[in-house]
Image (tube, rainbow, N blue to C red):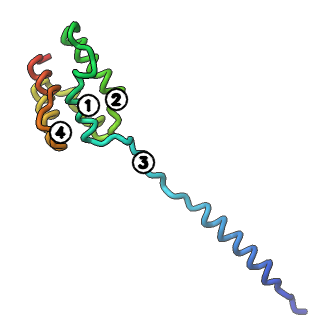
Amino acid sequence: MRMRIDWGAARAVLLGLWVVGCASQQVEPKPVESGQSFEAAMTLVCNVDQHVQVAEANLLEREQLRNDYLQDHVKNPDVIYHRTLWRVQATKERAKTIRELAGQCSLAKCAYADTIESEDL
């Protein structure tokens, strides 16, 4: 006795298996872009005093106001990483690091670096 194969059904089964097999292969998700360029983030850092009211505050309060503003507005992952590092540096070294980072994105001057160097917490 010979069995007859229904090729239409066989194709449908194979197509179904192929679709399920391809669907199970997950593509690794791409990292989410912050939408903020390195240059835009460093411009915010360098001009932070234009965005916060620091006139009446003492040195520690001023630095806290700046840090709070930068925490809320800097979204570039590279600048966030560098902020984490420079927060534990001595004042002169922090100013040097910030200037170097500003120089990487062609900012001629960084007022924040000048200010923290002159305040010398």
Amino acid carrying mark 4 in the image: Leu
Question: Which of label 4 and label 2 is nearer to you?
Answer: 2
| Marks 2 and 1 close (CB-CB < 8 Å) | yes
> Quick one: quadrant of the N terminus?
bottom right
Residue nearest the observer in this picture, 28 or 59: 59
**Residue 59: percent from left, percent from top:** 18, 12
Please tell me which of labels 1 and 3 falls first in the chain.
3
58 versus 82 height, above or below:
above
Residue nearest the observer in this picture, 44 or 84: 44
**Which residue is pictured at 26% across the width and 31% down the height?**
44
Question: Which residue is denoted by mark 3 in the rendering?
Answer: 31
Question: Which of label 4 and label 1 is nearer to you?
Answer: 1
Question: Which residue is denoted by mark 4 in the rendering?
Answer: 101
| Residue 70 located left or right of residue 22 | left
Amino acid carrying mark 2 in the image: His
Please tell me which of labels 3 and 4 falls first in the chain.
3
Question: Which residue is denoted by mark 1 in the rendering?
Answer: 44
**Which residue is pictured at 78% across the width and 84% down the height?**
7
Question: Which residue is denoted by mark 2 in the rendering?
Answer: 73
Where residue 18 sits, quadrant-wise, is bottom right
Please tell me which of labels 3 and 2 falls first in the chain.
3
| Residue 8 located left or right of residue 79 | right
Cα separation between marks 3 and 4: 23 Å
> Quick one: quadrant of the C terminus?
top left
Please tell me which of labels 2 and 1 falls first in the chain.
1
Label 1 crowd bin: few (<14), some (14–19), many (20+), radius 10 Å: some
Question: Which of label 3 and label 2 is nearer to you?
Answer: 2
Amino acid carrying mark 1 in the image: Leu
